[in-house]
Image (cartoon, coloured by chain):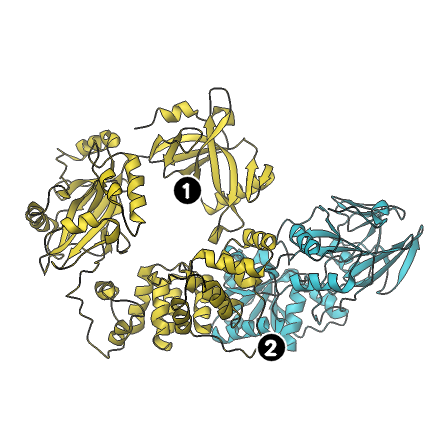
Chain colours: A cyan, B yellow
Amino acid sequence: MNISRTAAQHWIEPHAHGIYVKPADMWIDPSRPAERALVTHGHADHARSGHTAVWATPETLAIMALRYGTEMGTPIAYGDGFEANGVKISFHPAGHVLGSAQILLEHAGERVVVTGDYKRRFDPTCAPFEAVACDVLITEATFGLPVFTHPPIEGEIAKLLAAREANADGCIVVGAYALGKAQRVIAELRRAGFDAPIYIHGAMQKMCDLYAAHNVPLGELVLATGLAKAEMKGAIVIAPPSAMHDRWAQRLPDPITAMASGWMRVRQRARQRNVELPLVISDHADWTELTDTLLELRPAETWITHGRTDALGRWCELHQLKARALDLVGREEEDEG
Amino acid sequence: MQAFAALLDGLIYTRSRDHKVRLIADYFRTTPDPDRGWALAALAGTLSISTVKAAAIRAMAEERFDPMLFRMSRDYVGDTAETVALMWPDVSQDVVAPTVSEVIDVLSGTSRARAPAVLAELMDRLDANGRYALLKLATGGMRVGISARLAKTAFGQAFGLSVDDVEEVWHALRPPYSELFAWGEGKTERPDPADSAFFRPFMLAHPLEDGNVNLDDFVAEWKWDGIRMQIASTGGETRLFSRGGDEVTAAFPEIAAAFEGIGVVDGELLVRGDVQGGEAASFNALQQRLGRKNVTAAMQSEYPVFVRLYDILFDGTEDVRALPWTKRRSRLEMFVAKLDAVRFDLSVIIEARDFDHLAEMRAAARAVAIEGVMLKRRESPYLAGRKVGLWYKWKREPLVADCVMMYAQRGSGKRSSFYSDYTFGCWTPDGALLPVGKAYSGFSDEELKWLDRFVRNNTVARFGPVREVEKSLVLEVAFDAVHESKRHKSGIAMRFPRISRLRRDKPADEADTIANLRAMIG
């Protein structure tokens, strides 16, 4: 959009399949196998399999090992870093999911932060976002439209518990992404005082175990597979969104379909997915968090990736912040959120 | 307002009809007057706040938001009211939310010019769901999957009344319907509308799917291509109503003035042209007149209208709806004989030897302004709505053409974010495509998903919300008629086009030509 004041564009190249850090010869969150990859967090669109060498937080490496079955990579704890051919690389909490990190790149007197996915709300399952001063901020914009304001999670959890009370003979099945969202919903239910067993879909068990092993207590979890309908009365069941309208859900007693996602803010999105109880719970920054972060950091330049780059770019223009949109390959819309 | 907002949200997310009815009925039983009456009016589509138009909401939005951010948001959400409700800054906890009746009073009492500011003050007292409900209430058009009929059914269920009893008195009453609720709760007698000319529900027909009927039991009439209309007169007062029960007297004053008789009749409003009922273009003229509050003398003489009568509901003050069709027909013939022949005539009975003969006559009827054939059971009483086995409509076969998709636009409501509105074209002799129509229906949800993906993956240019696509997809388009049009570059326009099939198998260059279409002008 604008002529750049910073030199970052000469040593950081945005490509459709990832961000290339030239002097270090490293890719950030590459979507195809790379020799040397820096990975912000464990979601599949950021952490692909097949890289030769990986640098990530220990939690992210554990998640990748669980998903791809191979131990790999060099663990870098939050606040730690290393140097690669004149580029100082360090990892800082992003508050998105367990192990999620922002990556700070320092080179030629410039500081560049790649946020990866992030949020700034309290989340009992991961370390809170840390604001890192920088010259260039490469920010996500998944919910980069002013219509997206995520309400306080306490209210959404209260809605879920109220629906369970009102549907004592049935159950509530909550669609939640298997990494991050599911564990956060469970932990928030516990924080709200719900201490009954929570039923989970088989696909979530290992990830929940991994969270528990990383000191994120989730209380008693029961596998929802193979139980009689009568046993499931009054249950809260957490399942991946793909399983909700599947045969799997047919063995549940009178399920009310809930979905925990930032996209649930828009009524017609919830209707299109046949959701009866939309829960606006997101692990991404909402519009206010995105714009407040920019005002707080006031980077000389903002590069926008992943999501509604046009609207956040327009906001930057209105606030006289220099910004450009990067066209990275990623989800076009709402696979996860 | 919160209770009404919660009701709307419940209706949006509930799929089962019974559950929706239960939600509304509960609301009616637990909400005080007049809030519940206004809510009933909003759901049934009888609430109209003349000071607030969609433009007021846009004006209010432009006052507060950057127009470009608003447009991007509107494009994503697919609904102006929801976009504004979501973008609006949140309120502090301690403001008092307005009630439904306060909203109605405040908005009805303001001027159009003041409306955006008044609306904004109300917005500042509500949370996001409340703001959404407020804007829906202010503009009408709830879009929560509730028909007027379902709202009345819910009212009936709330108070143990039949929906037909509710229908019978409905049109004599006005929002906020306090007499109706008083009757529902057993506090008063049923409201008696005898002295006013009001709407009675139309009897409607099912489509004749396949198979046939025995003409000994059924009588055949033409289905005229005009505007279905009911005329109700007490002698002192005459009022005209369209299909949905909207009063349209002001749009057709010459009809009301010419009607001399007491009773209620059912017919079709037509323009007198060279052929019976006029040409296709005259239907458009009728539509234009329908929307008007006042109609000029020039319009009246340019498009001379008359009503072709189908049936009689009240003969004088006598309710004849329970009589069989044959008896009502004799009453109607006597009734019409006394009316002004310039403005009123009788729908003729089609004399066919048997069903096959009728089919031949129907097939030959394309040239005149006939939509098809009506089949009415000779013994049928006149009942509200569609009743199985009594009346059938047997429309003409549609015309079809193979067209090529050219542009696509996102839909709204249920289809927001999906590219669901398609402009398509046919070939000129020198190998160019010219648009011939636009359609947004006729496909299944599965096909819509496929079409949406096709548009996203084959976009060659963007013009604001419109995407131009690779000219490779053939759509079979069905339409009722095609006529000359100066508005379109192709010189032709289709009537009621809809997508009948996706012809993924067909190469685009084998689609129809403009000349093919022109040959179908009837």
Q: Is residue A18 above or below residue B407?
A: below
* Residue A69 at least partly seen: yes
Specify the subunit that label 2 lies on: A
Residue placed at 49% from the left, 48% from the top? B411
| Residue type, mark 2 in image | Ala
Q: Quadrant of residue B484?
A: top left
Choose between B332 and B49: the one closer to the eye.
B49
Q: Which image quadrant: the N terminus of chain B? A: bottom left
Alpha carbons under labels 1 and 2: distance apart: 49 Å
Q: Quadrant of residue B70?
A: bottom right
**According to the image, label 1 marks what residue?**
B442
Q: Are marks 1 and 2 on the same chain?
A: no
Of badges 1 and 2, nearer the viewer stands 1
* Tag 2 secondary structure: loop
Specify the label residue B288 is tagged with. none
Specify the subunit that label 1 lies on: B
Coordinates of residue B383 in the picture (x, y in percent): 19, 56
Q: Is residue A13 above or below residue A192?
A: above
**According to the image, label 2 marks what residue?**
A196
Choose between B374 and A151: the one closer to the eye.
A151
Coordinates of residue B2 in the picture (x, y in percent): 47, 73
- Is the residue under label 2 in contact with that under label 1 (CB below 8 Å)? no
Q: Is residue B167 above or below residue B216?
A: below
| Residue type, mark 1 in image | Gly
Relative to B90, is B429 on the left or the right?
left
